[in-house]
Amino acid sequence: MTTALITGSTAGIGAAFARRLAAQGHNLVLVARDGKRLGEQATELHDRHGIEAEVLVADLSTEEGIAAVEKRLGDRKHPVDLLVNNAGFGNKGRYLEVPMADELTMLKVHIEAVLRLTSAATESMRSRGRGGVINVASVAAFLPRGTYGASKAWVVQFTQGAAKDLTGSGVRLMALCPGFVRTEFHERAGMGTDNIPGWMWLDADKLVAAALADLARGKTVSIPDPRYKALMGLVKLTPRGLLGGVSSRTGRKYGPQ
């Protein structure tokens, strides 16, 4: 039986990955900051699907948290076959309105943690000749969106480059770029969502199903919905200056995740 490690597993997209993978018979390593919620999630998934659900309490905005997950990913006796780097957050406010400490924390979680955990996982996977990594980015990666968008753009570029370098190793890497998903993401960031049209919202469970199918097909970037694929196609044709104006009016108020 294979094992998947999911960061930010207790809510939103991470919880949807946990449900889907457990239903498919994968054992899980569930990673988040809230030990109580992790314990409840592990118990529920074990009881419902009969899988083993390991709990790892870790804050990926800290050195200790990242190192703890690195260590688990490097455990050759209990290997991880799929890593889902899902942990992330948004900051409310435009550039220079957000405290520098919060901006740096975002870079720690969205970039440093993703780099280090992907590296720890793929090193072990490459030695076994198999494995997969899904790095959760955002359609914000394709828009001029300040630190959030820039960090997600890094995730996409890094994942594509690493995937190319690991071609032929048996290890697959994919950047997942969702749009607006009904999760706790916006509420935690204090972002309003009243102005987002209903058709732009995605279902987390359907998104995860599409993402796993894209990984199996060998895609390195997944935009798992026809609506957002069409929108991102239009983005490619839109002048960057115009995109910047639209982004400044909308993106910081309710950034996708």
Image (cartoon, rainbow, N blue to C red):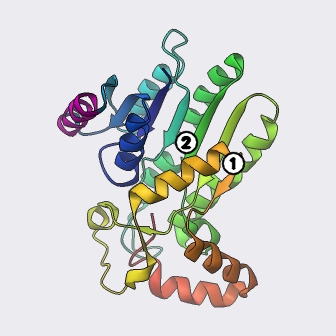
- Badge 2 element: helix
Q: Decide which of 240, 48 is in the foreground and name it.
A: 48
213 sits to left or right of 10: right
Disc 1: which residue = 158
* Residue 114: assigned label: 2
Q: Residue at x 34, y 54 (%)?
A: 12
The residue that appears at 53% across and 18% down in the rendered structure is 79
Up/down of 228 relative to 42, above or below: below
Quadrant where the image shows the C terminus: bottom left
Residue 63 lies, with reference to residue 214, above or below; the image says: above
Q: Assess whether mark 1 and mark 2 are in contact (beta carbons under 8 angstroms).
A: yes
Coordinates of residue 237 in the picture (x, y in percent): 75, 85
Residue 76 seen in render: yes
Given residues 147 and 195, the one toward you in this image is: 195
Mark 1: amino acid? Phe
Left or right relative to 36: residue 216: right
* Percent coordinates x, y for residue 70 in the rendering: 50, 26
Q: Quadrant of residue 200?
A: bottom left
The answer to which of marks 2 and 1 sits earlier in the sequence is 2
Which region of the structure is painted magenta?
Answer: 36-48
In this rendering, the count of numbered labels is 2
User: Residue at (57%, 58%) from the top-left corner?
Assistant: 151
Q: CA distance from mark 2 to mark 1?
A: 9 Å
What x and y, as percent, mark residue 223?
A: 60, 63
Q: Is residue 47 magenta?
A: yes
